Amino acid sequence: MYLKNKIFSIFVLTLSLTDIAAQSSIKILEQGRKTSIRGLSVVSNEIIWVSGSNGSVGKSVDGGNSWQWITVTGYEKSDFRDIEAFDENTALMMGITQPAVILKTTDGGTSWRKVFEDTAKAAFFDAMSFYNPKEGFVIGDPVSGTNFYGLRTNNYGESWEEIKQFYQLDTLQNGEAFFASSGSNIKHIDKDKIVAVTGGTYSRLIASFIKPTQIPIIQGLAPTGANSIDIYKNKAAIVGGDFERDTLRMANCVLIHFSRKKLRIQSPQTSPHGYRSCVIYLDENNLITCGTSGVDISSNGGMNWQLISNESFNVVQKAKRGNAVFFAGTNGKIGRL
Ligand SMILES: *[C@@H]1O[C@H](CO)[C@@H](O)[C@H](O)[C@H]1NC(C)=O
Ligand SMILES: *[C@@H]1O[C@H](CO)[C@@H](O)[C@H](O)[C@H]1NC(C)=O
């Protein structure tokens, strides 16, 4: 019995990487709508919200089988690059620029109310992260010079206060900014612990508990840098690359291990297959990343990545309550793992 089990477990271990890849496939649920989706919030296995360009918002309450779509009145040209939903009725969403605006719905997406707007022409919002429905953060690009720009709410998004300093960081480098590619380059670890990653001329990890740290992701040009970070306990996975050369398989992923005061930074042994705009942990070992050139999975904490689909997606998210995984991308494409 003992021996049999041991042999069995070795067998399972050696097979696991290829096995999971072979078993993982993505079912396309929706396609063809005139919107590029970058906002995705999976409340549960049943309730999923998406947001995109051309003022579009979509919602499913049956696990993605059917979708209700609306174009937000007065915001028909807005590009809603991030959305955070809390249940079937309540969500906050962010229009990136002109207007740089935050909208809220409490009636399931039928009507949207403006809770914040920055009327400066240069205002540009990149992503939102919420610790809980009450406390959230929006990160933006510098409006004046290279000054850091953020917004914080403490009352369910009803009002927002401008933040001029992100822990030890009050200015970015020239040409350093945040990407608005998947709403996932800023994450709450804890109530007051937030991490974010930058790109452009520099690609850095910025956080409350460490000095801003340059990371080994391709950088130096506007389309290069880190696009997404996800956290699992004391580990982080970061992805990015060069979105104009989206099959370039170089310096596009970094793994971080946070210990007391130090950071251990590692690059994978086999990288994801090109530029990736979003990464998530399913658990400590299993991760998924997606981008315009396809979808990769890892079953060993991000050290090795295997391509499971050539489908282009901007964003991937796992259910906050549940285990369903959804993807979204251009032409209104939505997929389910
Ligand atoms: C937005 O709508 C216009 C008009 O229907 C269309 O031409 C354009 O391709 C749409 N944009 C996206 C990103 O789908
Ligand atoms: C992706 O496309 C390449 C080239 O066409 C093909 O060889 C490969 O099998 C495809 N991979 C998947 C996972 O579909």
Image (tube, rainbow, N blue to C red):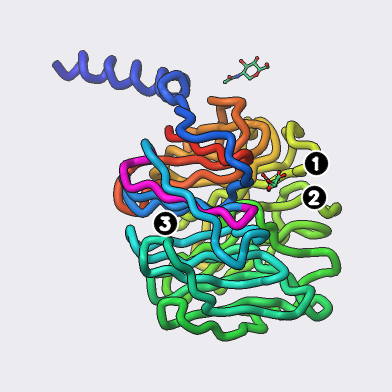
Disc 2 and disc 1 in contact, CB within 8 angstroms = yes
Q: Amino acid at mark 3?
A: Lys
In the rendered image, the vertical position of residue 15 relative to residue 95, given as above or below: above
**View quadrant of ligand 2:** top right
- Nearer the observer, disc 3 or disc 1? 1
Judging from the image, what secondary structure is the residue with disc 3 in?
loop
Q: Amino acid at mark 1?
A: Glu
What residue appears at the point 59 percent right and 63 percent down from the top-left corner?
127
Circle 2 residues within 10 Å: few <14, some 14–19, many ≥20: some
Circle 3 residues within 10 Å: few <14, some 14–19, many ≥20: few
Judging from the image, what secondary structure is the residue with disc 1 in?
loop
Q: CA distance from mark 2 to mark 3?
A: 30 Å
Q: Mark on residue 244?
A: 1
Circle 1 residues within 10 Å: few <14, some 14–19, many ≥20: few
**Mark closer to the chain start, 3 or 1:** 3
Q: CA distance from mark 3 to mark 1?
A: 33 Å
**Mark closer to the chain start, 2 or 3:** 2
- Whether residue 224 is visible, yes or no, is yes
**Quadrant placement of the C terminus:** top left
Q: Which segment is the magenta one?
A: 53-64
| Rendered location of residue 206, percent (x, y) | 64, 67
* Circle 2 residue: 223
Q: Is residue 241 magenta?
A: no
Judging from the image, what secondary structure is the residue with disc 2 in?
loop
Residue nearest the observer in this picture, 188 or 325? 325
Q: In screen coordinates, is 33 left or right of 112?
A: right
* Circle 3 residue: 233
Count of marks, rendered view:
3
What residue appears at the point 73 percent right and 74 percent down from the top-left corner?
123
| Rendered location of residue 140, percent (x, y) | 67, 70
